[in-house]
Amino acid sequence: MPTLPQREFVELGAGASLRPSCSPLGYAPRILVVEDEPSVQLFIESVLSDVAYYVTVVPTARMALAQARSRQFDLLIVDLSLPDRDGIELVRELHSESALSRILAISGFMVGDMPNTVRAAGAADTLAKPMVRTKLLNAVYQLLDTGRAIRACCEDFAVMLQADSEGCGTGAFAGAKVRGCVTEPL
């Protein structure tokens, strides 16, 4: 099994403590994808890996339960049409066993009352297949609350820069200011 990288830290200057780097959540979220179609597996894994998430893909409900029981995931993406078990039953079981994880249910048959049924089983959101990159990422960002984490991280970063520019430190951020979440020299 490959070793996962440790969280990155940035030294903030003289007398400053070490803080996590300004990635969306301060770490790379772990996502479990339960999907039996190879082309959809590849699409989801590619999209999420490109934005620095740790992605584990399994093709069956049995394997999903084993993974969810062996480690904590931040998000579970579950296809509702699996070869070995009903997806709604799986969502219900994963929700009861992985209370800290959010569940995104995906299906090519997300019609009628299906979204409400899946949410009642424990899914936080649903997404119809076929899906496009932007819809997948928007759903994942919303479920992981990445937007709020980015704003909080940028606010902390701005405070650190302000302290550094007022002579509280002579670190790498001295003489810099924040525009959005990008550091630019003065």
Image (cartoon, rainbow, N blue to C red):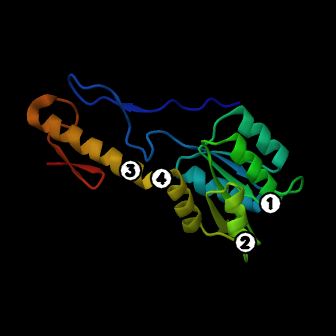
Residue 117 picture quarter: bottom right
- Which residue has dot 4 on it? 145
Residue furthest to the right in view is: 84
Mark nearer the N terminus (2 vs 1): 1
Which mark identifies residue 110?
2
Helix, strand or loop status at disc 1:
loop
Above or below, 100 against 120 in this view is above
Q: CA distance from mark 2 to mark 4?
A: 24 Å
Q: SS for tag 3?
A: helix
Q: CA distance from mark 3 to mark 1?
A: 33 Å
Amino acid type for the residue under numbered disc 4: Asp
Q: Nearer the viewer, mark 3 or mark 2?
A: 2
Return the x and y of residue 87 as percentages of the image width and height.
80, 57
| Left-right relation of 10 to 161 | right
List x then y, in percent, for residue 21.
38, 37
Q: Pick whichever of labels 4 and 3 is earlier in the sequence.
A: 4
Which residue sits at x=79%, y=37%? Answer: 66
The residue beneath circle 3 is: 150
Q: Are marks 2 and 4 in contact (CB under 8 Å)?
A: no
Q: Mark number for residue 68?
A: none
Q: Quadrant of residue 168?
A: top left
Separation (CA) of disc 2 from disc 1: 17 Å
Whether residue 158 sits left or right of residue 62 in the image: it is left
Q: Give the CA distance from mark 4 to mark 3.
A: 9 Å
What's under tag 2, amino acid-wise? Met
Q: Is residue 20 left or right of residue 113?
A: left
Of callouts 4 and 1, which one flags the residue occurring earlier in the amino acid sequence?
Answer: 1
Report, in whole angstroms, how far the alpha carbon at label 4 lies from the one at label 1. 28 Å
Residue sitting at x 71%, y 44%: 96
Q: Which residue is mark 1?
A: 37
